[in-house]
Image: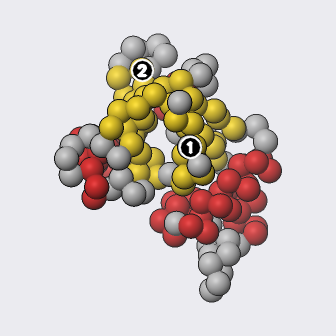
Amino acid sequence: MNFWFLINPFVAWLASSPFHFMISHQLLIIQFEGRKSGKQYLVPVSYHKHGSSYTCVTLRSNIWWRNLKELSHTKIWLKGKLIDAQVDLEFKDDLVVENTLRDLVTKNRVDAYFAKIKLTKNGDPDLEDLAKAAKLHTVLRFTVT
């Protein structure tokens, strides 16, 4: 059984509860409806803040993010509040994905671990690992409107 199938509902509940402060500094929850099923999904993702935007990555092989491809906006749970956000995806330009991954993994070692990018002693990502990971990931950018 997939570990995330068990843990994601709890993390999503926590993010929308008064206890959100335990994870809000590192995770946001994307809320969306399945394109075909109409089912509501709540997907926790690690993020990095840039002004009013929040950047996340996920593996391209994960199919959930494809539900966002044709959306201009979606809802995210951020710091205990459900807010509207513009959504932009990048999965075609590996250089943009690589630069985004570089930024994420240098600020969060957990992201480096999940992206399978080794960090050097001074915290810089291994360039070969970074290039490989860029070909496997999708960037999701949420801008609060």
Earlier in the chain: of badge 2 and badge 1, it is 2
On the rendered structure, is 125 left or right of 59?
A: right
Residue 57 or 3: which is nearer the viewer? 57
Q: Is residue 31 above or below residue 22?
A: above
Residue 40, given in percent of the width and then of the height, sits at 35, 23
Residue at left offset 56%, top offset 67%: 107
At x 52%, y 61%, the residue is 111
* Location of residue 81 (image quadrant): top left
Secondary structure of residue under mark 1: loop
Mark 2 neighbour class, 10 Å CA radius: few under 14, some 14 to 19, many 20 or more: some
User: Which residue position is annotated with label 2?
Assistant: 33
Q: Is residue 33 left or right of residue 126?
A: left
Residue at point 47% right, 52% down?
46
Q: Considering only vertical position in the picture, is 102 above or below 119?
A: above
Q: Is residue 1 visible?
A: no
Numbered mark located on residue 52 in the image: 1
- Compare residues 83 and 36 and report the one nearer the observer: 83
- Residue at 69% x, 38% y: name it: 90
Q: Residue 127: give x, y in percent of width and height.
A: 76, 69
- Residue type at the position of mark 1: Ser
At which x and y percent is residue 138?
63, 42
Res 30 quadrant in image:
top left
Give the camera-side residue of 19 and 129: 19
Alpha-carbon distance for marks 2 and 1? 24 Å
